[in-house]
Image: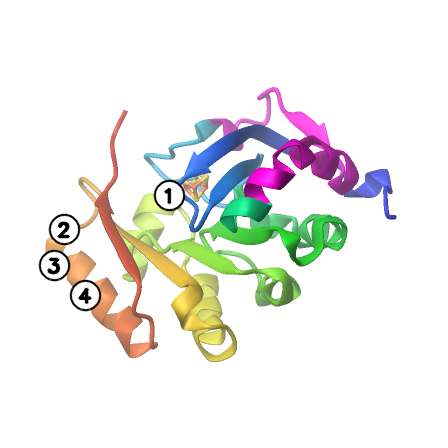
């Protein structure tokens, strides 16, 4: 069993007994620290704070911690949702974790998808569900809101559409105050439909 501390990763929190927010069954959210984006209304701004206090886990120590809910996961078809922050900054950690839990636990990845395609390809074989927050498909809006290009996002969406079960991809398309409007949201959904996606979660970002 791999316990090499080179796989140690920082987390901002572990949230147990979630129902109906990360897909099927009872889930635990494991939220990584760090994210490549700088969203104006980031819901987890501690992810972006290099001084934030974090919890360090190896895949083994995280697995041991989450084992307490093994029966809940198995009985409900739930499992672990990796979020953050950006979980796809840590594909090797997730692969090591999956080597420990195997197929018993459903793995959901909650991601912006703004990472190199190789990171996506690494975790596709072990992922049951993707929840992807695309912000807005319009590059100018996206860049204004996140301070990054969305070229990785578009490339990865196209690749996933061709190489992953689209029924297991939920795409969040938010209305973002001062950055986009209902027409922009509609345009994003139409573009995503052309890529073959059918499951969308429309919502409005809550500004705190
Ligand atoms: S992608 Fe998520 S964690 Fe990253 S900056 Fe945006 S809202 Fe925050």
Q: Residue furthest front?
A: 75
Instruction: Identify the residue at horizontal 84%, vertical 38% (top origin).
Output: 5
Pointers 1 and 4 in contact (C-beta within 8 Å): no
User: Looking at this view, is 205 or 20 the one in front?
Assistant: 20
Res 44 quadrant in image? top left
* Residue carrying label 3: 183
Q: CA distance from mark 1 to mark 4?
A: 28 Å
- N-term-proximal mark, 4 vs 2: 2
Pointers 3 and 2 in contact (C-beta within 8 Å): yes
Badge 2 marks a residue whose secondary structure is loop
* Residue carrying label 2: 181
* Residue carrying label 4: 187
Instruction: Identify the residue at horizontal 43%, vertical 64% (top origin).
Output: 168
Residue 1 pos. (x, y %): 88, 48
| Picture layout, residue 126 above or below residue 194 | above
Q: Is residue 192 left or right of residue 183?
A: right
Rendered image: mark on residue 20: 1
Using a 10 Å C-alpha cutoff, classify the residue at mark 4 as few (fewer than 14 neighbours), some (14 to 19) or many (20 or more): some
Query: Magenta residues?
Result: 46-73
| Picture layout, residue 42 above or below residue 138 | above
């Amino acid at each position: 069993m791999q316990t090499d501390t080179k796989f140690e990763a920082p987390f901002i929190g572990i949230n147990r007994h979630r129902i109906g927010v990360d897909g099927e069954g009872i889930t635990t959210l494991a939220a990584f620290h760090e994210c490549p984006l700088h969203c104006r209304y980031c819901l987890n701004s501690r992810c972006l704070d290099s001084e934030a206090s974090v919890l360090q886990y190896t895949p083994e120590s995280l697995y041991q911690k989450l084992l307490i809910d093994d029966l809940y996961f198995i009985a409900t078809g739930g499992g672990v949702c990796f979020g953050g922050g950006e979980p796809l900054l840590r594909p090797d950690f997730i692969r090591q974790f999956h080597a420990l839990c195997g197929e018993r636990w459903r793995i959901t990845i909650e991601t912006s998808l703004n990472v190199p395609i190789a990171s996506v390809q690494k975790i596709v074989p072990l992922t049951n569900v993707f929840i992807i927050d695309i912000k807005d498909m319009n590059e100018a809006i996206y860049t204004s809101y996140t301070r990054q290009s969305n070229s990785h996002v578009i490339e990865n969406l196209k690749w996933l559409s061709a190489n992953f079960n689209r029924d297991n991809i939920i795409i969040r398309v938010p209305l973002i105050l001062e950055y986009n409007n209902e027409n922009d949201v509609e345009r994003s959904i139409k573009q995503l439909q052309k890529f073959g996606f059918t499951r969308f979660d429309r919502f409005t970002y809550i500004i705190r």
